[in-house]
Image: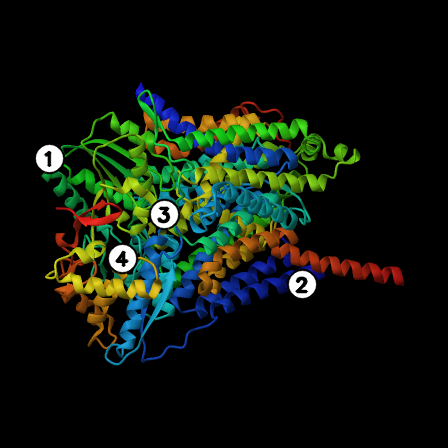
Amino acid sequence: MALGSAARSPFVIFAAAIVLVGAGVSNSYYLQLLTVIGIYTLLALGLNMLMGYAGQISLGHAAFYGLGAYTSAILTTHFHVSPWLALPLALLLSAGVAFLVGIPTLKLSGYYLGMGTLGFGMIINVLFREWSSMTGGASGLVGIPPLAWGSFVLSRGRAYFYLVWLTTLACFVLCERLVNSRIGRALRAIHDSERAATAVGVDTSRLKLGIFVFSAVLAALAGFLYAHLVSFISPSSFDFLMSVRIVTMVAVGGMASIWGSLLGASLLTLLPEWLHVFAEYEMVVYGLLLMVIMIFLPQGLSRGVIDLFAQRHLLSSLAKRLKG
Amino acid sequence: MNELLQYIFAGITNGAIYAIIALGFTMLYNATELINFAQGEFVMLGALGLVSLRTGLHWPLPVAFAVTVLGVSAVGMVLERLAIRTVRKPHPIVLVIITVGASILLRGLAMLGWGKDSFSVPYFSKHPPIQVSEATILPQSLWIVGIVLLTVGVLQFFYKRTLAGKAMHACAINKKAASLLGIPSERMVLLAFAISAALGAVGGMIIAPITMCSYDMGTLLGLKGFCAAMLGGLGSSFGAVLGGFLLGILESLGIGFFSSSLKEPTAFLLLLLILYIRPSGLLGAKAVKRF
Amino acid sequence: MRHREAMLKTTLRITLLVLMVGGLLVATPCWSQETYKIGGIFSVTGAQSFLGDPEKKSLEMAIDAINAKGGIDGHRLEAIIYDDEGDPTKAVNAATRLISKDNVLAIIGPSATPTTLAIIPVVEEAKVPLISCAAGIKITEPVKPWVFKTAQNDVLAVAAIYNTMQKKEVKKVGILTVANAFGESGKEQLLAQAPKFGMEIVANESFDAKDTDMTAQLTKMRTTKPDAIICWGTNPGPAVVAKNMRQLNMDIPLYQSHGVASGKFIELAGEAADGIVLPTGKILVATLLPETDAQRPVLLSYIKDFEGRYSMPVSGFGGYAYDAMGILEKALKGSGGNREKIREGIEKLTGYVGVSGTFNFSPQDHNGLGSDAFVMVQISNGTWQLLR
């Protein structure tokens, strides 16, 4: 399954852009902002695979984000485990929880699935808040050690920027391969009609579960990167509102679009920056944006704009054909 | 043993709140197969509306009540008109996200309008707490329970006896068939939104005196009300009321006999339980269809 | 068609990247060497807005007053204030932005403990002085060189309550705390200090900040027969607790925390507020203080300015930011805009009479307040009275 050169080039351009931006931007504030966008892109990417391609709603995705962050944070602060060892453990735990939760929940459909994931998300958030001996409770967990390679501290400025974005790029490539593979086609079949997919022999429950676990792992990875960037986490960063935010990034950026995750994450992180003078109106703008895009461009911005162009092109070529 | 009665009273008070919110969800779902995530915000608007009209402008209670209900219904209708009807692709994910966006928008507008403070409203009647054996219950709680039951009665009457209600019921059973019979399904949807918004507003107003009203009071209430609706069965009005009271009482008992930290997850644990064991809910008339 | 689509996609992607980077460079503020920039991070919206809103207003008021007097050493002051919405991530964002983009000399805030703890690593590494308005004791213990705070420690508040209770011969206590950082911190202190004052905690319950009915918790606590109940939280929950206790005919004394030290609490609790005892900064009883009290003129002047400018009643919370700016003003004088000198200036400051108390900083004490920062008050007929 070789990728054609046409498909490979966007990633090369992207990698080049990452290197250039990383080298060019020296202000630590901007670097940190871009790094956070990278982490959110990872989150949106995972959820996009679940929502956009497989067509399953998840309203509790912040729970996996939090599981990744807290697992690593607890292991590295309370048990002095190396972060590099904590990472696979965090990913495994998240995958395991997703597996267990997914089995009963994915049998539901439509709204029920959304509700189930919502309930799960709320319960995990309560866990973060109540298990204070481990998680620090509502006051949060301080002193998460930075990532380091030997003596070189990675959790700062440019180094972390590269780490996060290269990780994100790697996941982009992974997802692109997934989408263009048999699995990806099967997923889209499920999205369009689960019954039809089953009729042609797709093992829908196993696939849905697999994608659910995959998206949970990506979210946990994002959580890990986040925890070691900010060195302090608290349950309020992983609540229902955060789950809504991730869904918004996917919906606005473009469902079933890998680059849409980047667009959505960037837009939603930069929006408060642009609006900070109008901080009071942020919620109103946010809600309006979400509604307007969903009403008029339900496929999100990236797909929606392309669709608009495609439609016009289609219409004009049709017109030409009819004329001559 | 005396505590048990008090726990149940507390549970009934909270339960009535969940019940009326659940009614709003169920009612809308019945007519349109839509879950409106902004339902909690209608409750908030009702409560804050009452605050402004009562405490701010000192209007008499019945007038303030009626005006607020009408106002919030109007908001519901605007939401349906602008946001729901104009959707190009009524895929459930899209609709869910639209109503989530609507709830954020309404919250943002409420914050601009009423600020971030909390407000309170005086009780409907000036009676002291009523003593029943060793436990006491606030007269406001009786108002709440009474109004909720009254509302259920009115809804039942609406469905069974009025033409509009029967038409809505018909739409809920089969939209295409109903429109073949000449029932304007679009208007029914609008009406359903108006009524569910009104229900939310009533809920907000009756709980306003015992709770603190602020721009963000709707979110958690909405979520819990939804859990109650699912618990009772999304297709059934009685189920909504039953689910609401059951949730309230179970929360209370959880605090009383186990731990106060159990209160918040109770609603969601019950939700997950119901989803896994009996998705149609305790009284579930019809199962939620696949999309 | 496919080629066109691919080209379009690539164009969109490049546009996206350009937008992203370009969007960041929007509106770089022109920075004048003459202005001293002071950063502020407050929870202006969100659950702690009752803290952040008056704090922001107080800071702006203080800075305007200083500018009206000609600034500091001839330099004008400029306040750059961001809203962290009570979210630690946004607080970190705001802190980094203030330091790297806006180049502030010092930061005042945030309003709450989790948000403060989140930005401590940032200010420590960037070596920027921080004066927090949050109550958590972990902020200044252990002492960090660049971190200070003006809000009273909850340690002192708890001690004040227990002291009073001890005098009234209370032995068995039931505690009811909010399930957030403020409540948790209070609970920790209440449990830790109880044995020192001979108190026995017979009941320990919690409630969520948005809960509307606490009768279940109170009923459960009643079975353990406490002599008094301490409720630790911030509005509106404690007001509900007060009302619930009346409803349940519980006539044991109710003590509250300084989290409800504002007129809002009396408004929310109505008649149920009568008789409640709590520790508070002197601001709520400024007019009742003796003429000899050093804080009295400072308090009266703050109240007059604040209420005059904003037409809303004062609370102790705005005072934290007001004091922070006052302290910063003293440290800025003669510092020439050097952050290390500012830091030292704060650390050496003693005898500063502020709204929250009299501050005496030292290298070991970055909070500077003593037990006199609190007075015990009792609500009577809807007003604050000094407890005798």
| B79 versus C124 height, above or below | above
State the quadrant of the C terminus of chain A: bottom right
Q: What element carries label 3?
A: helix
Structural distance between the alpha carbons of marks 1 and 4 = 34 Å
User: Can marks 3 and 1 be said to lie on one chain?
Assistant: no
Q: Return the x and y of residue B192 as percentages of the image width and height.
A: 63, 38
Q: Which mark is residue C133?
A: 4
- Reading the image, the residue beneath label 1 is C169
Q: Which mark is residue A84?
A: 3
Q: Point out the tag, 2 or 1, that comes first from the N-terminus.
A: 2
Q: Which mark is residue C7?
A: 2
Q: Point out the tag, 4 or 2, that comes first from the N-terminus.
A: 2
- Chain letter of mark 2 equals C
- Chain letter of mark 1 equals C
**Label 4 vs label 2, nearer the camera:** 4
Q: Is mark 2 on a helix, strand or loop?
A: helix
Q: Return the x and y of residue A315 as percentages of the image width and height.
A: 79, 59
Closer-to-camera residue (B192/C272): C272
Q: What element carries label 4?
A: loop
Are discs 4 and 3 less than 8 Å apart at CB? no
Q: Can residue A131 be seen in this view?
A: no
Amino acid type for the residue under numbered disc 2: Met
Amino acid type for the residue under numbered disc 3: Trp
Structural distance between the alpha carbons of marks 4 and 2 = 53 Å
- Chain letter of mark 4 equals C
Which residue appears at 33% of the width and 46% of the height?
Answer: C235
Amino acid type for the residue under numbered disc 4: Cys
Please state if B179 lies on the left or on the right of C332 as rendered: right
**Label 4 vs label 3, nearer the camera:** 4
Q: Return the x and y of residue B223 as percentages of the image width and height.
A: 48, 38
Are discs 2 and 3 less than 8 Å apart at CB? no
Which residue is outermost to the front?
B60
